[in-house]
Amino acid sequence: MMNPLPLCVFMLALSGCTTAQEATDIAFLLDGSGSVTPDQFNTMKTFVKNVTSALLEFDTLFAFVQYSTVTTIHVNFTQFNRTGFENQVDDIIQQNGGTNTASGIRTVVEDVFISSAGARPEANRILIVITDGQSNDASLYPTVTALADEKNITRYAIGVGNAFSNPLALAELNSIASSPNSTHVFTVGSFEALDLIATKLETSIIPTADVVVGMRLRVSSTKNLNETEIEEQVLKPFADKLRDQGITVAGIGLRKVYTVET
Ligand SMILES: *[C@@H]1O[C@H](CO)[C@@H](O)[C@H](O)[C@H]1NC(C)=O
Ligand SMILES: *[C@@H]1O[C@H](CO)[C@@H](O)[C@H](O)[C@H]1NC(C)=O
Ligand SMILES: *[C@@H]1O[C@H](CO)[C@@H](O)[C@H](O)[C@H]1NC(C)=O
Ligand SMILES: *[C@@H]1O[C@H](CO)[C@@H](O)[C@H](O)[C@H]1NC(C)=O
Ligand SMILES: *[C@@H]1O[C@H](CO)[C@@H](O)[C@H](O)[C@H]1NC(C)=O
Ligand SMILES: *[C@@H]1O[C@H](CO)[C@@H](O)[C@H](O)[C@H]1NC(C)=O
Ligand SMILES: [Mg+2]
């Protein structure tokens, strides 16, 4: 008969940084079609600068691409300038014209997420599509999203304005985005309201923690739990409790297990 087995479990969450310092390459695809007013286009650019600025402290690279009838790569990952990115975004001039969103996605997948454009082979790949309405080339979504999936490109779709009360427009956002749509689709009523989703988007792209937790749990158990079981039965429920309190848990895991034989 085995005595109760004391286990000391160390957990660590890091403040303001990712648990894994993973490289992340992020491409913004901006709707420059004629349905977007010049003021709205400027607000979109401000949003892009805000999100870029917030994620700059991490191991990130950015690319800025605009689509309308045609797609223009304004800044690829090689060209991205860490200290001068605000000027790079400011320099983007709205094209006007049609809304070929799927073709824009194809260009990003084929011509931006490649090493000759500075994309890093080991990096997580993120595409953020911002649009104000339905596209003119929706039939191409299945093809281009399959191409994106092959390259493991995680896609966020941000729908701005009242167009997305239309189920067809909303369905389009869902076809652009990676699943689940609950975390990859955002809709906001206006370009000004983009600010309201910035933090949620940033945290979703690069999970960060609110607090430093370095703690030691002592678990008495009559069972000899293996590491998987400790993670499932002890750490995950604890992390869920923290999340219920609104605390962002960047990561939680087992550092060390001491088993003491008695
Ligand atoms: C990056 O931007 C800074 C600030 O605008 C500028 O001084 C610098 O020349 C730029 N670097 C390149 C390589 O363009
Ligand atoms: C990315 O930008 C660099 C620097 O301007 C350029 O040499 C390269 O051709 C671009 N890559 C692609 C694939 O467009
Ligand atoms: C995509 O991710 C899968 C699973 O992690 C991996 O096997 C595959 O090599 C990745 N593909 C690319 C193009 O990075
Ligand atoms: C998310 O996707 C599911 C399954 O495809 C769908 O039933 C649901 O309506 C979508 N949610 C929204 C908000 O579009
Ligand atoms: C950008 O950030 C500034 C400063 O935090 C904020 O006032 C503004 O509302 C943001 N704008 C957008 C469009 O995200
Ligand atoms: C841990 O124990 C469970 C349940 O007994 C078992 O299914 C699992 O394979 C074990 N995992 C490891 C890593 O030993
Ligand atoms: Mg349009």
Image (cartoon, rainbow, N blue to C red):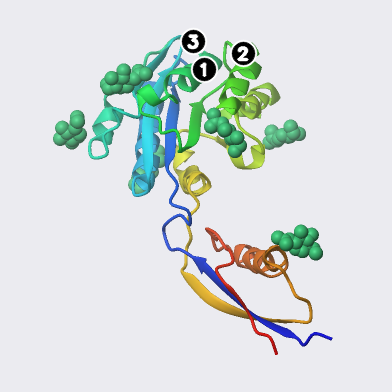
Where is residue 191 drawn, in percent x and y? Answer: 46, 33
The one nearer the camera, 232 or 40, is: 232
Per the model, the C-alpha gap separating discs 2 and 3 is 15 Å
Mark 1, ligand 2, within 8 Å: the answer is no
Write down the residue under mark 3: 98
- Label 1 is placed on what type of residue? Arg
Q: Is mark 2 on a helix, strand or loop?
A: helix
Q: In the displayed structure, would residue 209 be above or below residue 95?
A: below
Q: Tell me if residue 157 can be seen.
A: no
Ligand 7 near label 3 (Cβ, under 8 Å)? yes
Which residue is labeled 2 in the image?
Answer: 140
Distance, label 2 to label 1, CA atoms, is 9 Å
Circle 1 residues within 10 Å: few <14, some 14–19, many ≥20: some
- Residue 67's spot in the image, x, y percent? 44, 17
| Residue 110 to residue 58: above or below | above
Please report whichever mark, 2 or 3, sits nearer to the chain's N-terminal start.
3
